[in-house]
Amino acid sequence: MSFASSIYLTGAEIGLSVAALVLLLVTAWTGRAATRMITIAAVAALVGALVFTLSLPNDGVAANAWNGLIRIDGFALFAKSLIYLATIACLIVAPHYFEKRGGYRGEYAVLMLFNAVGMGIMVSAADLMALYVGLELSSLASYVLAAFVRDNTKSSEAGLKYFILGGLASGIILYGVSLVYGFSGTTSYDGIRAAFTADFSTGAMFGVVFVLAGMAFKIAAVPFHMWTPDVYEGAPTPVTAFFASAPKVAAVAMLVRMATGPFGGQIAAWQQIVIFAALASIVVGALGAIGQANLKRLLAYSSINNVGFILIGLAAATPQGVSGVLVYLSIYVFMTIGSFVALLMLRDGEGNPLATFDDISGLSTTSPALAWCLLALMFSLAGIPPLFGFWGKFVVFQAAVQADMIALAAIGIAASVIGAFYYIKFVKVMFFDEPKGAAPAKAPVSHWVVLGLSVLVISPLGYLLTPWLGNLADAAAQALFYAA
Amino acid sequence: MEFPILSLMLAVPLVAAIACLFLAAPAARMTALFATLINLALGVMLWLNYDIGGAQWQFTERAELFAGFQYALGIDGIALMLIMLSVFLMPICILASWDSITKRVGEYMAAFLLMEVLMIGVFAAQDLFLFYIFFEAGLIPMYLIIGVWGGDNRIYASYKFFLYTLLGSVLMLIAMLWMVNEAGTTEIPALMQYDFPVDAQLWLWLAFFASFAVKMPMWPVHTWLPDAHVQAPTAGSVILAGVLLKLGGYGFIRFSLPMFPDASADLAWLVFGLSMVAVIYTSLVALVQHDMKKLIAYSSVAHMAIVTVGLFAFNVQGLEGAMMVMLGHGLVSGALFLCVGVIYDRLHTREIARYGGLSINMPKYALFFMLFTMASVGLPGTSNFVGEFLALAGIYEVSTFVTLVCTTGIILGAAYMLYLYRRVAFGEQKNADAAAMPDLNAREWAMLAPIAAAVLWMGVYPESFLAPMRQDIAALENRLASVAPEYDSELAVGTPRERAANYVEYHGDKGGAH
């Protein structure tokens, strides 16, 4: 485990950190003049990190870096690629949103870069200390991003709420980590697994529960979801799009690695927790969304609902289940970025967002292309075939059935019908109702590109990706079950 | 490699649907009509090239495009007939919407063409999950058709349609996942031969039943149908009654019966019970309707109940009868909705009391309406007679009581249909505006005449339609033979008498004694 190979394996994180630090200095010296250049440079750095990550050897053999603090395996590479991709998309659509408000600064791109570094560490950490450092780096950057529009009370409120509740969750995780360390005597994942397989006491159980509770907060699973609608609504829309995509991938991947790695010998200890959180998230996410008039709040509940389906894959606790989680996450990233970019494009001539159902009624006549894209996204989120969102649900439910958890699958899929109600309400408002307001203003090309690519992926053409995506996800999932 | 005719039949309307989205109204109408006529021609080619008595699955295509399931198409005689029904009704639907749809014509035509793709896909799919995708995807265009172009209460109807049918189908997906996990294949022909454990069959059967019973629809989950029918535009009702309702029956005949024969036999009482209630109850409900479309919608529920009893009779007559009722009902109820549409376009009301005496000012219309009314009643010489007679003959071999109740339903059917016809076409012309309506125009002739011809063809020479299905139905009966029920009215065979019944004992020749 030489120094050079450690640097090579974590090259993406190191490169991104250096880029972020340099860009921070540039921002400090140039002020607002160079924000555009800084954003472009940050996107370039992320593309570089993505290409580098994809070029790392992915041959089914896990490689340890920094004396086992970081593990680079198929799973980490899969999750990181997805994270970098989502971050790039969110960064591309951001500047235009702030243009009219004049609040855009170079720090935005820098914070996104730091966030990406933190997320990369989160998903590849193989040690509790490395995990916590990654988690905090990502979280702290997120708190600032949520409050990025300083003169807007809602944004500040979102930032504060996110900070306080996020801090609480980090505390809970840290407490759990200390218990886990206390009862196993080590912070390394492999060591914990060995210790817990030999002896799993009540105290260790408490540690596991605390760690999982804190992580449930980070992925916004019920019953730790309360912050989500407020933060999603208050944060600037490009930031919300980011929160709903990349950090969610990172948090879910972190949870999956944690559950199948250090706690992988004690599946029975956490399986019921995950099952409960899955079903509760599906139901609460669906019911909570029904009464919402604000589109961002609605999508916040939708993301809670989706986390529930993701957790069904984890509840199966099998390689198929983890593979299902990864496939679901990949499709979810495209659906959620597509939806939020569509929301970004919904703004009137003065740049005010069309934020409620009333504002978008009759959108299919005022802006047909946008309405058809949203229609595809909504049916995809509802999991109606032939749209690609169906495939995500299909693979997680298939894993649950293969793991003989038929009741879980049946209840989960029946509850998905409740969720379909508000997705089709979206379609109803756009297509069945008469237009009330003015047509949305013209959106920039960058938005159309991101939206178009997302819709292309979630269209029925996406099924052509299934063999490729399935193989990658299977290999990634297999990497986690190396010891099993 | 054979000529991929089934893929072509999917591709033609799909391409046309995408094109229609970008076209202006007149061009979209022509494109849609042209595409559906091409598909009709392809369908005729399919029928002509279908080798009756040949391989069970013909025109098979297979491509490994996806993970977890395959793009596999192929048809047997049953699927062939249902595909023919779909491609036959489609151009008529486009014609029916020619003048009545004025807003967002391109999107409307695209939705209908997409519907055609999905219907052909459902009947041609040979992979379980491919079937599910086509089956479920139909919700999207139908939701839009009802919601955008429907009547006043269209939003309620579209929600109800969507959520009802979705809830019915999702449990079927879980059952499918379990089946594939158990049997290790997603191919429908292989699954039709697979013997699932008997105790699992019950649950699988119930999950499939939840889906098909809603689609069929069976009492008591039929309530979405009257709402959807009444609010949908005319062509939407035609497609709904003509083809979408057949998905339920097709599901039973393709999945429930051959894949879970034991559970089907065990739960036949449930199907019989619900069907008997449906036949009597919905017929009585139809009798008191004021809205023409609602009346025909309820009559559909009653006819579909005859289909379900025929299917669960487990014998050749019952199965053939059920298929013939499905085909006949597809034509006749579609035609009846078109008849309603013809006068709705003129007067913009479906209220029965607003019409009357139409045979005076619209004699040609009244003639067509009469033919389809009689066909719906099941008059000999029309399509529905063949199906209903066979289905009832089939069920009579199983249960006299069920036959008695279902036949009563046929009598009630005659009552409500003739009562409808009397109120609309006969009697005095009490409404001046209804009396001033012009008779059929050329476009309406072109819609109704082909269906009338098909109805008579099916009634006079049903062999054309039965022949392609015969082998498949025989195979299905074979599969069900081990669980077929006893004939409850079978005469008890006692010990034969020693002598003939009119034997009088001969007491010797006492002649000459008197």
Image (cartoon, coloured by chain):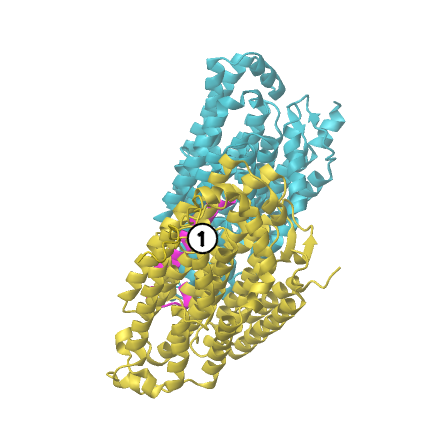
Shown in cyan, the chain is A
Indicate the position of residue A201 as horizontal and vertical percent values: 49, 12
Q: Which residue is mark 1?
A: B397
Compared across the picture, whether A306 is left or right of B17 comes to: left
Compared across the picture, whether A198 is left or right of A220 comes to: right
Which of the 4 image quarters holds residue B300? bottom left
- Is the C terminus of chain A in the top left, top right, bottom left or bottom right quadrant? top right
- Principal secondary structure, stretch drawn in magenta: helix
Instruction: Describe the element under mark 1 as helix, strand or loop.
Output: loop
Point 54% across, 12% down: residue:
A199
Indicate the position of residue A131 as horizontal and vertical percent values: 57, 27
Q: Colour of chain B?
A: yellow
Amino acid type, mark 1: Glu
Q: Nearer the viewer, residue B184 or B320?
A: B320
Which class describes the residues within 10 Å of circle 1: few (<14), some (14-19), or many (20+)?
many
Indicate the position of residue A14 as horizontal and vertical percent values: 67, 34
- Classify B383 as above or below A18: below
- Classify B1 as above or below A20: below
